[in-house]
């Protein structure tokens, strides 16, 4: 993409904005916090964005047409998290380090979910989620596992164009 295209036109990344906004919107659904015991805190909200984004990226990886666009969606995540850090007062010198930690957390979630979602064992998925999420109690988060698996199934049923449009559920 040329300098002038970036300056005056829409970028390829802009086409994924509806999907990014739907990802964030899904991560903020009250049921995750009220029914699934995710902490409604800054860290808990990041955990939910990373969880839903990981599920969306896994869905995109399963599509020949969408797989090349996973990097663009990740760029939107990075841009949004960078802006959030700066808006919350994190100094320029710390933003890079914090972004590295956020990307590492996202990559870790993506890796464990890729493996954990292969089977149908919600208890095993709950153990993984308990290790990787900030929860309000120490109980095994079976409701979180069930809701995560349901979203994963819903994403798998959506056609590619619906996913790009931000329709994460049928």
Image (cartoon, rainbow, N blue to C red):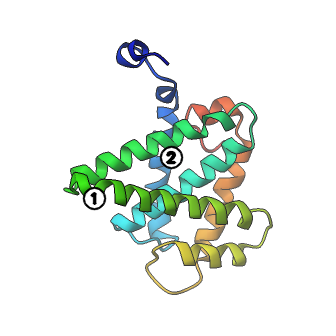
Percent position of residue 10, x then y: 44, 19
Disc with the residue nearer the chain's start (2 vs 1): 2
Q: Is residue 28 visible?
A: yes
The residue where tag 2 is placed is 23
Which residue position is annotated with label 1?
94
Residue at 34% from the left image edge and 48% from the top image edge: 82
SS label for mark 2: helix
Quadrant (top left, top right, bottom left, bottom right) of the C terminus: top right
Residue at 30% across, 46% down: 83
**Left or right: where does residue 108 sit relative to residue 42?**
right
| Rendering quarter of residue 99 | bottom left
Disc 1 crowd rating (10 Å Cα; few below 14, some 14-19, many 20+) is few
Residue in front for this viewpoint, 30 or 145: 145
* Crowd band around label 2 with a 10 angstrom C-alpha radius: few (<14), some (14–19), many (20+): many
Q: Nearer the viewer, residue 56 or 3?
A: 3
As drawn, 86 above or below 48: above
Residue at horizontal 68%, vertical 54%? 152
Q: Residue furthest front?
A: 93
Residue 31 seen in the figure: no
Residue at 79% over, 68% down: 120
Q: Position of residue 56 (x, y in %)?
A: 61, 47
The image quadrant of residue 140 is bottom right
Q: CA distance from mark 2 to mark 1?
A: 26 Å
The relative height of residue 106 versus residue 139 in the rendered view (above or below) is above
Q: Nearer the viewer, residue 143 or 75?
A: 75
Residue 169, image x, y percentages: 63, 45
Total marks placed:
2
The percent position of residue 123, horizontal first and vertical second, equals: 70, 78
């Amino acid at each position: 993409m040329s300098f002038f295209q970036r300056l005056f036109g829409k970028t390829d990344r802009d086409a994924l904005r509806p999907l990014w906004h739907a990802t964030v919107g899904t991560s903020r659904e009250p049921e995750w916090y009220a029914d699934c015991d995710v902490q409604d805190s800054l860290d808990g909200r990041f955990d939910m964005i990373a969880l839903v984004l990981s599920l969306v990226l896994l869905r995109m990886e399963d599509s020949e047409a969408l797989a090349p666009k996973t990097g663009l969606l990740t760029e939107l995540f990075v841009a949004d998290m960078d802006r959030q850090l700066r808006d919350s007062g994190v100094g320029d010198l710390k933003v890079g380090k914090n972004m590295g930690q956020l990307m590492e957390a996202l990559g870790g979630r993506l890796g464990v979910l890729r493996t954990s979602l292969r089977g149908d064992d919600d208890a095993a998925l709950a153990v993984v989620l308990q290790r990787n999420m900030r929860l309000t109690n120490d109980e095994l988060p079976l409701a979180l596992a069930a809701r995560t698996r349901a979203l994963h199934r819903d994403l798998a049923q959506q056609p590619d164009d619906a996913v790009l449009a931000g329709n994460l559920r049928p």
